[in-house]
């Protein structure tokens, strides 16, 4: 099964993605994680990606699609995957025509996400370089502008599972499993 997870930063995508991965035995991957790894590289691409990420902007669609395509060619993703963070724009949806069987939207309000993110940073004491308040706000803004049309697309197609993300981790997980028929 090919599952896509969509939601603003702080919605709980990686928590739910990892839980699902464990339960369903399907590998989880996140484009945010992939780009954070690339940003560590001392290459032109690494430097460009780091600069864009730290400002809270999206990596250009073609570059993103090429990188995701390369990853998904790996044998471990042959029988399916749970992908967090892609597609995030309509152009990326175009590149991903047969890429999603089900799309899960974890819905939380901007206010809740901001609160969770400031708490998350305060909790473990380390602030991720791309998680400044300005970058987080920019990312939320990008979500409404570029990713909401993606939700509309999958909603019309009948592939969108909409989940209230402002509940406990277990409740959310159970509801997702129910929708997936598991
Ligand atoms: P995330 O951890 O999903 O919030 O991603 C962190 C950052 O990686 C984003 O702010 C973007 O700069 C970049 N990124 C992740 N996924 C994508 C994508 N599908 N398209 C463009 N940029 C992305």
Image (cartoon, rainbow, N blue to C red):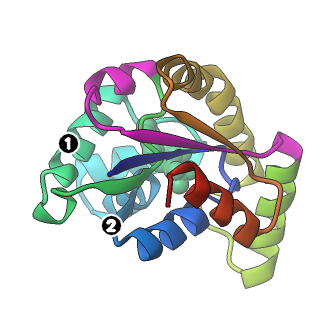
Residue 109 is a magenta residue: yes
Give the residue displayed 35% in from the left and 38% down from the top: 100
Residue at mark 2: 27
Residue 148 is a magenta residue: no
Answer with mark 2 or mark 1, whichever residue precedes in sequence: 2
Residue 166 horizontal/vertical position (percent): 82, 55
Q: Is residue 78 left or right of residue 21?
A: left
Give the residue displayed 68% in from the left and 26% down from the top: 144
Q: Is residue 118 left or right of residue 37?
A: right
Residue 119 is at least partly visible in this image: yes
Residue 8 horizontal/vertical position (percent): 66, 44
Q: On the image, which quarter does residue 176 sit in? A: bottom right
Residue at mark 1: 69
The span shown in magenta is 90-111
The Cα atoms of the two marked residues, 2 and 1, are separated by 15 Å
Residue 111 horizontal/vertical position (percent): 88, 45
């Amino acid at each position: 099964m090919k599952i896509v997870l969509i939601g603003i930063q702080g919605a709980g995508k990686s928590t739910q993605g990892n839980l699902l991965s464990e339960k369903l035995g399907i590998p989880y991957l996140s484009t945010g994680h992939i780009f954070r790894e690339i940003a560590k590289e001392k290459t032109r691409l690494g430097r460009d990606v780091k600069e864009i990420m730290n400002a809270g902007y999206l990596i250009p669609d073609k570059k993103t699609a090429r990188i995701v395509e390369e990853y998904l060619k790996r044998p471990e993703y042959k029988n399916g995957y749970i992908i967090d963070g892609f597609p995030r724009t309509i152009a990326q949806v175009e590149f991903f025509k047969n890429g999603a069987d089900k799309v899960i939207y974890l819905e939380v309000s901007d206010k809740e996400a901001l609160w969770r993110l400031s708490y998350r940073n305060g909790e473990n004491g380390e602030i991720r370089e791309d998680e400044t308040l300005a970058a987080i706000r920019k990312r939320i803004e990008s979500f409404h502008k570029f990713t909401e049309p993606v939700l509309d697309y999958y909603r019309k197609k009948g592939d969108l599972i909409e989940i209230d993300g402002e509940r406990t981790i277990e409740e959310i997980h159970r509801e997702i499993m129910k929708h997936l028929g598991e």
